Image: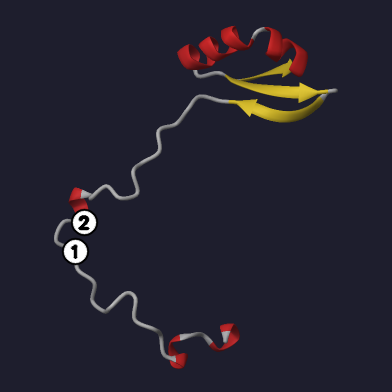
């Protein structure tokens, strides 16, 4: 559920808004002169892109991934 707050109200009650977002996961839309300018949303943890996935253990490249491609490897429309 999204709740709309003006910049003035959000600034005056930021601490309580943050607490509510953290505890309930509610999203707030911050508006300036009635125009939405920002969303206050719960934080989502980002997966580590360098984490080794168990499901990929033992996977190997079939070709050299950094080798240059031949001209025939590119579709005609993208040359």
Residue 30: % across, % down: 71, 22
Say which quadrant the C terminus sits in.
bottom right
Disc 2 and disc 1: Cα gap in Å? 5 Å
Asked if residue 79 lies left or right of residue 5, the reply is left
Q: Name the residue under label 2.
A: 56
The residue positioned 39% from the left and 84% from the top of the image is 68
Q: In which quarter of the image is the N terminus?
A: top right
Q: Quadrant of residue 28?
A: top right
Scheme of colours in the image: secondary structure
Q: What element carries label 1?
A: loop
Q: Are marks 2 and 1 in contact (CB under 8 Å)?
A: yes
**SS for dot 2:** helix
Residue at (42% x, 90% y) in the render: 70
The numbered disc on residue 23 is: none
At label 1, counting other C-alpha atoms closer than 10 Å, the crowd grade (few under 14, some 14-19, many 20 or more) is: few
- Percent position (x, y) of residue 8? 76, 13
Q: Residue at x 56, y 25 (%)?
A: 41
Q: Which quarter of the figure has residue 26?
A: top right
Please state if 68 lies on the left or on the right of 4 as rendered: left
Q: In this figure, which residue is indicated by the disc labeled 1?
A: 59
Q: Where is residue 15 in the image (x, y as percent from the top left)?
A: 58, 9
* Position of 61 relative to 10 (above/below): below
Q: How many labels does the image show?
A: 2
């Amino acid at each position: 559920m999204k709740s709309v707050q003006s910049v003035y109200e959000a600034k005056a009650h930021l601490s309580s808004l943050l607490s509510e977002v953290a505890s309930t996961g509610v999203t707030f839309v911050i508006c300036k002169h009635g125009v939405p300018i920002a969303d206050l949303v719960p934080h989502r943890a980002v997966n580590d892109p360098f984490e080794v996935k168990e499901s990929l253990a033992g996977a190997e490249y079939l070709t050299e991934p950094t080798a240059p491609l031949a001209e025939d490897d590119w579709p005609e429309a993208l040359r």
